[in-house]
Image (cartoon, rainbow, N blue to C red):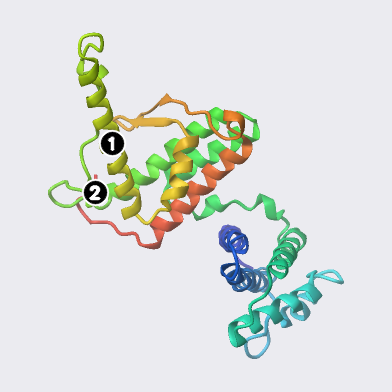
Amino acid sequence: MLNERVVIRRLAFIKYLYKVAVKQSQRPEPLCSASILTFHDAIELFLQLACEHLDIGKGKGEPTFLDYWDILASKLPAGCPTQKESMKRLNKARVGLKHHGILPSKSDIEAFRAIATNFFEENTPLIFGIKFSEISLLELVQCEETKRNLKEAVQLLEQHKIEESLGKVAIAFDQLMYDYERRKIDQFGLSPFFFGEDLTFLDSFFIGINRSEAGKLADFIDKVKESVEAIRNAVKILSLGIDYRRYIKFKLLTPNVYRTLGGTYYIFEKRPCGSREIPTVEDVQFCIDFVIESSITLQEFDYSVEGYSQ
């Protein structure tokens, strides 16, 4: 049997694929058709992992998608895994799309999304002894500081401490960016993702301009600072391959954080948004998912410059 940590990590990846498929299924036609392939891949990976977890041999040759139900039946209660007839429909739609270019209708896509959801919710506890909803995508995050703060954010969310949870998520994202960038600093201490100096403490207030005496100058300085910061952040996020539109929503929901040279974080501005200007559980979950997805995006192409990271 596989190591428990390996099983959980692979289940987390399967759940990630499932969530990707859900998002694909919600896109307009014909783009939503791609979800059929992703749902099928996620379920097939699940069935393969189930065989390894239960230490069941697959016999000679590679089994077909539908063969797994008979293979797994030898070590599971009668009727398990479930959803076999529904999976026949999904498999038929996948063959039609991949091999014959037959595009399923939007209503079919919605039905397959429900079928896939039922499959995972019914079979995960039966085979792995854990609810599908309890599988955490946090296992896919490699930055330990980010993972730790996200776990704390999840715990705070369970206690309905919305603002505190959003603060932890904001710190987790900043740690993710800092960790990725610091490992790519060259021998001169320069980062390839440097797009200008930090202007946090260079607004009119910190410079010491008296607004009653020089209001227009103070407004000009603040607006220039805000514009430069916005451009700098946008270029950095885009250069890292992170979805900028989702990033904007994330920033609207989370407080601003400041990291000192010693690594201490301070939260100095809260931005209540979401439903009726009050952050909701769904808002926080979106932010947690965004950080996880950003981590996966960065991990897709990661490297370190040996000897120069700080």
**Tag count:** 2
Quadrant of the drawing holding the N terminus: bottom right
Q: Is residue 192 left or right of residue 31?
A: left
Does the image show residue 75?
no
Whole-percent x, y for residue 281 in the image: 63, 37
- Answer with mark 2 or mark 1, whichever residue precedes in sequence: 1
Label 2: state its secondary structure: loop
Q: Which mark is residue 227?
A: 1
Whole-percent x, y for residue 11 in the image: 61, 61
Residue at 59% x, 51% y is 136
Q: Which mark is residue 143?
A: none
Whole-percent x, y for residue 89 in the image: 75, 77
Q: Residue furthest bottom?
A: 60
Q: CA distance from mark 2 to mark 1?
A: 30 Å
Q: Give, as a three-letter code, the residue at label 1.
A: Ser
Residue at 42% x, 25% y is 269
Label 1: state its secondary structure: helix
Q: Is residue 266 above or below residue 118?
A: above
The residue wearing badge 2 is: 309
Q: Nearer the viewer, residue 84 or 74?
A: 84
Snapshot quadrant of residue 120: bottom right
Q: Is residue 222 left or right of residue 70?
A: left
What crowding class fits label 2: few (fewer than 14 Cα within 10 Å), some (14-19), or many (20 or more)?
some
Quadrant of the drawing holding the C terminus: top left
Residue at 54% x, 36% y is 152
Q: Give, as a three-letter code, the residue at label 2.
A: Ser
Q: Check if mark 2's residue and mark 1's residue have beta carbons within 8 Å.
A: no
Does the image show residue 259?
yes
Q: Is residue 262 left or right of residue 75?
A: left
Q: Residue furthest front?
A: 216
What crowding class fits label 1: few (fewer than 14 Cα within 10 Å), some (14-19), or many (20 or more)?
few
Q: Residue furthest right?
A: 78
